[in-house]
Amino acid sequence: MTLPNHRRKAAFDESYFICRNVEKYYSNFNVVGQYNKHFSKATLSNALKSMIAKNPWLSYNFFHISDKEPVDYHTDYELRCVDSITFDKVVEYRQIDKFDERTFETINEFSNKINCTDSPLWQLCVFETDESQYVCGYFCHTLHDGGTALQFQKDLVKELEAFEHETQVVDNLFDYEKAKYELPDILPARELMTDLYIPGIFQRVKLWMNVKFPTIVGWFWRSIDYLKSFMGISEEKVPVFASFAVTKDLSSKFKIVNFSPQEVRSMTQYCRANNITLTPLFNVVAQDCIEKLIFPHYPRPDGFYEYASSHFIAINGRRFFPKFSNPFLYGVFVAGAPTAFGYMNIQSKDEFLPHIKRFHSMIYDELKSRRSFKLMWTWAVADISKALQTKIGKSERYTTMISNLGMVKDDPQSSWKIVNAWFGLNTSIGYHFILNMTTTETGGLNLVIPYFPAYGDLEMEVNGEKVPVMDQFVNHFRRSCQEIIEAV
């Protein structure tokens, strides 16, 4: 039996992700690590057992505690330790010919099940080729985010080194009954441990009104736009790009773009010289690719294909708010900032920088205001299931979502290193394209681009031949980045 101090109700952000999991609005997110050393099952099993013993967060799952219908995700789930964890339950081995985009399509089929007494909300799949091992950690967003997944890889490498010479496979990694009197109290929800996610009273009223009276609020803002138009101060708006109606089909296609360590140094030097970062640079280059290669396939009713773009920027609380980071090596400490960007129509490499600087200023404004974190509080008062269901059948998706996990630095005191890392997830019901960035000192920057599958069927003519549009997307992306930084 679970002790009272080892259970608690789900908090508002957790409740949102529980609903997304249970109602299958996404499958998983993942970070894949490639190490400089090969490891055995004995080494891996001992390493995982040690990690779980040191970090109770890795033993948690959410459980449904009510029989009432419909489900209230705010009250009907609680967090507690699973009963047990065995090696075979959380680790799978698969043999592959090579690690590439198709591997991410396979990973996209994985999921972490809520309500499991013998499985936490993370699992591993070790992909093996004849030469290498690729360790895929895949996670549920209820308890984990990209920063957590990358920290998991860092911690795992340390533990693998500690148990490098073990020869005995450990099957039982965790047993609650044996450990419960030594376990600390269950850890609180990350969104409640600081005031970062809690809006002020006026913000709460505004967010509450948006949730409870969306029709009235929408009418109010449309009225303001009408008055501006009547007074002659409105500006003509280009429609935001839309293509296909949203469904719960979670399939995605993927592209991988690698930038060598030298290329990363050149891009970083360019960014520092212009007081920007890689995130806005990559997002603007991606939007340019989309404008030139995707939009022409989806003309508007008037025959034109100029569209505005909408973007969702992942804001890493650990990275940008260091005073909050120490207790949050694990757990969700991220928010998303929605932004809009007009049609750029870039014609030369010199035209990129003003757009990049504008995008950079938008990110800076979000960091300064912390609006994106306060917006998460909306899930405390919303009907989560209904809110997600209303997206189905509509065509609103963000043009891009971008997330940068940053640099994985080598530990000079360790002989074990992460030589390559990739960050993946699917486009789910929210995005046309995603830009996931992770960098290592040895392998450089890996950009994983999940995209809506239909774009993989598009073709264009190049030198008299039909070629896949997404292949040209990758080529154009690399070429544009290279041209932009040539001035360095």
Image (cartoon, helix red, strand yellow):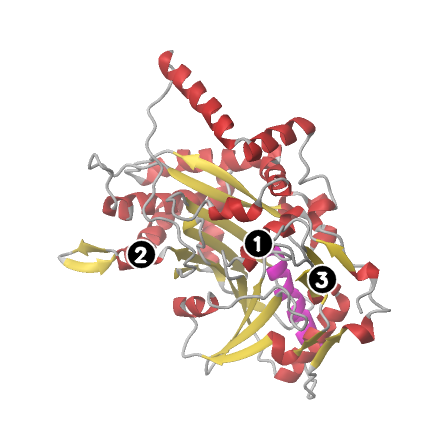
Q: Which residue is mark 1?
A: 19
Q: Quadrant of residue 100?
A: bottom left
**Which of these two is toward me, 262 or 450?**
450
287 vs 218: above or below: below
Quarter in which the N terminus is drawn: bottom right
Q: Does the magenta portion include 156? A: yes
User: Badge 2, how many Cα within 10 Å: few under 14, some, many 20+?
Assistant: few
**Residue at the spot x=79%, y=66% of the render?**
2
Main SS of the magenta part reads helix
The furthest residue to the right: 181
Residue 3, quarter of picture? bottom right
> Is 306 on the left or on the right of 267, as rendered?
left
| Span shown in magenta | 146-162
**Which mark is in front, 1 or 3?**
1
Instruction: Please give the name of the residue rendered at 55% of the width and 78% of the height, measured from the top-left corner.
Output: 92
The amino acid type, in three-letter code, at marker 3 is Trp
Image coordinates for residue 248, horizontal then vertical, percent = 43, 56
Cα distance, mark 1 to mark 3?
20 Å
- Are the residues at dot 2 and dot 1 in contact (C-beta closer than 8 Å)? no
Q: Residues within 10 Å of mark 1 (few under 14, many from 20)?
A: some
Q: Secondary structure at mark 1?
A: helix
| Left or right: 50 in relation to 446 | right
Q: Amino acid at mark 1?
A: Cys
Q: Earlier in the sequence, mark 2 or mark 3?
A: 3
Task: Return the mark for residue 207.
Answer: none
Residue 410 percent across, percent down from the top left: 62, 63
Identity of the residue drawn at 58% across and 72% down: 124
Mark yes or no: residue 163 visible: no
Q: CA distance from mark 2 to mark 1?
A: 27 Å
